[in-house]
Amino acid sequence: MRKYLFFISLVIGVIFLIIALRSEQIKEVFNTGILLCLSCIGLG
Amino acid sequence: MRPFRISQIIFTILINSYILVFFQKTLIYTGYLKSFLVPILNCWSAPTTWFSCPLGAYQHFIIIKDFPFYVLGLFLIIGAFIGRMACGWLCPFGLFQDLLFKITKKKISLPQLAPLFTIILFLFSYLFIWLKFNYLSLTIKILIILISTIIGFLLDIFLKIRIKIFDLTFLKYFFLLFLATFIVFFTNEPWFCKVCPQGTLEAGVPLILYDPENSLKTMAGLFFYFKILIFIIIFILAIFIKRIFCKLICPIGAIYSFFNKISLFHLKVDKEKCGKCNICVKVCPTDINVYENANQTDCIRCLECYYQCPKKVIKLKFS
């Protein structure tokens, strides 16, 4: 059971990362700070 | 020194080593590596950090109404292999709490500090006011929060409710679902970042102190001091209670905790040989009962129990 759940998690994780790559979410992470920067330092 | 401690120190220095920021007189590093996430809590806005925080990115994707494939994909893969091990071996805030806990030998058990209604009424009144009654004056807001907190405190005394540590650990799921997800979705504001003590430690205070252009100091207002207050509360509690932030608050720990039972790397206890001496429980940073269930959701896989077990009945499995 542990092995099946491990493989399911791994496969879904890899699929998610592929989707993230294709939809350019990795580039989008760079923009995180534009929204969050002031909040992170408690000024937003 | 234990391997997990060496790993914590190296990783903390490694991901926060962009000291060029001080020579370039810029606020933070904004290069190519900022597109990559670290698997633990590490503030995006920390002046010397190279990478992004997965929880910040998670909230960012919720704000822009995009499913967080990148963040959840990372959590799924890391969780599937090692469960919550990243919390024990890589997290800078975990290291910070571990060091704080070494300050004094006087320890407090969490049940004495777990007034349920006080916490719930404080959180709800604070969030409710912020979301619904933003037009109220600051004094009235603070008064409402204070009064509801006092009512919660009186209820705790009157009903004599004190929650044990294992019961309270559900709070981190509350923070994940409520503060880092639902409220973020409906208000388009990164609420966890607004109160994150790691952000205060790594970004808030250093940036205000550093501030090469004197642009931030003038902006620091009430919310900044509120954030400092939360940090001070966590700071004081962490001196007396082991890894309090990881046990009760951290949404990343909450996500990883689901994988502890299924991860490839796990612990196994030979229950027949175990003498139930309780040493593993005493040394555990998250107070779990190792010999009953070594892979509980709060285990951060620091392996302190493995090293200190006198009969060596705890085995490491990678299968």
Image (cartoon, coloured by chain):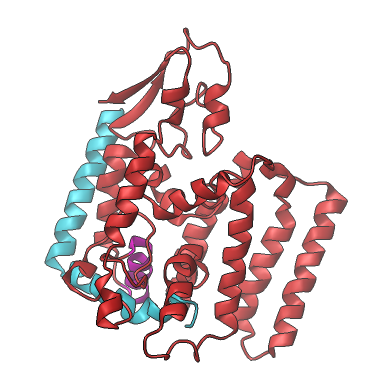
Q: Is residue B128 above or below residue B25?
A: above
Give the letter of the cyan chain: A
Give the letter of the red chain: B
Say left or right for B176 vs B42.
right
| Residue B297 part of the magenta-drawn span | no
Considering every residue shown, the one lying at the far front of the view is B23
Say left or right for B84 vs B293.
left
Residue B248's spot in the image, x, y percent?
56, 50
At a point 34% along the width and 29% down the height, the residue shown is B266
Q: Is residue B315 above or below residue B94?
A: above
Residue B98: tell me if it is visible.
yes
Residue B64: tell me if it is visible.
no
Q: Main secondary structure of the magenta part?
A: helix
Foreground of the two, B161 or A30: A30
Residue B103's spot in the image, x, y percent?
59, 47
The quadrant where residue B235 appears: bottom right
At a point 58% along the width and 29% down the height, the residue shown is B282
Foreground of the two, B294 or B15: B15
Considering every residue shown, the one lying at the far top of the view is B272
Residue B276's spot in the image, x, y percent?
56, 15
Query: Which residue range is magenta in the image?
Result: B53-65
The quadrant where residue B85 appears: top left
Residue B229's spot in the image, x, y percent?
62, 70
